[in-house]
Image (tube, rainbow, N blue to C red):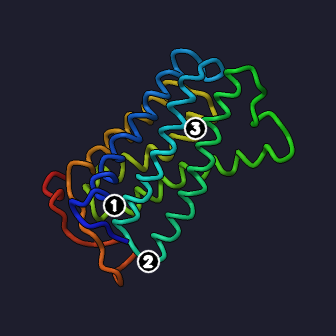
Amino acid sequence: MNAVPGSPADRLLNASLVVAPVLYLISNVLYALRGWESDSAGGIFHVLGAVAYTLVLIRIATWTSGTFAAVLLVVGSIGIAGNVAYGFDAIHVALGDVSLVDRDGAAVLIKPLGLGFPLMLLLCAIALRRVAPRWVAILIGLAAVAFPIANIGNIPALGIADSVATVIGFGALAVRRVPVPPADGDPIVDGSTTASAMS
């Protein structure tokens, strides 16, 4: 996959690397201050941030190719769907409804879908390990591991730290150009980047 450098689509995808993590950070700060069960504003930013991560997913996919790119897109789509669902669930709970997490039947679908999001982050870290500074891939990888711990364990401080890590990691990618892999290249590109001097 690739996007024409400098095109409107390319600029939009680059902007998402900043916008999505920042929206999610705002959400986690609001959750920490007011509690996720009583703050619909946090849920709104949660949904907006989760939707914006769709563009982050596409951006990272343009920096890889082959089977890995396909897997990233499938897992990412599942994870983003689950993440959006959790955002709306938070809004419902804040309005007095019962959380889907506490319901049986079809409602349990939200749980496996939600776990797809940190898996997407982990795949993004793997995709970036040879086309971006190592510290960026490590930071995003750590965020992927911390995400389910913070959210399932309801640990606000860890949730904020996790969001800060993604803001720094993905934000660093927005200000540098990552090479586009050849169509027939390896799924994970091994090559130099203009950003490698900063690693």
Mark 2 or 1: the one toward you: 2
Determine which residue is flagged by label 3. Answer: 149
Residue type at mark 2 is Gly
Q: Is residue 146 above or below residue 130?
A: above
Asked if residue 51 lies left or right of residue 137, the reply is: right
Asked if residue 95 lies left or right of residue 132, the reply is: right
Q: Is residue 99 above or below residue 12?
A: above
Q: Position of residue 6 (x, y in %)?
A: 21, 59
Determine which residue is flagged by label 1. Answer: 129
- Considering every residue shown, the one lying at the far front of the view is 8
Q: Position of residue 175 (x, y in %)?
A: 21, 48
Return the mark for residue 75: none
User: What residue is shown at x 15% (from left), y 60% (from top)?
Assistant: 194
Determine which residue is flagged by label 2. Answer: 66
Q: Position of residue 144 (x, y in %)?
A: 48, 47
- Label 3: how many residues lie within 10 Å, few (<14), some (14-19) or many (20+)? some
User: What residue is shown at x 15% (from left), y 51% (from top)?
Assistant: 198
Q: CA distance from mark 3 to mark 2?
A: 31 Å
Residue type at mark 1 is Arg
Mark 2 or mark 1: whose residue is earlier in sequence: 2
Residue type at mark 3 is Ile
User: What residue is shown at x 41% (from left), y 52% (from top)?
Assistant: 56
- Considering every residue shown, the one lying at the far bottom of the view is 184
Q: CA distance from mark 1 to mark 3?
A: 23 Å
Q: Is residue 190 above or below residue 141?
A: below
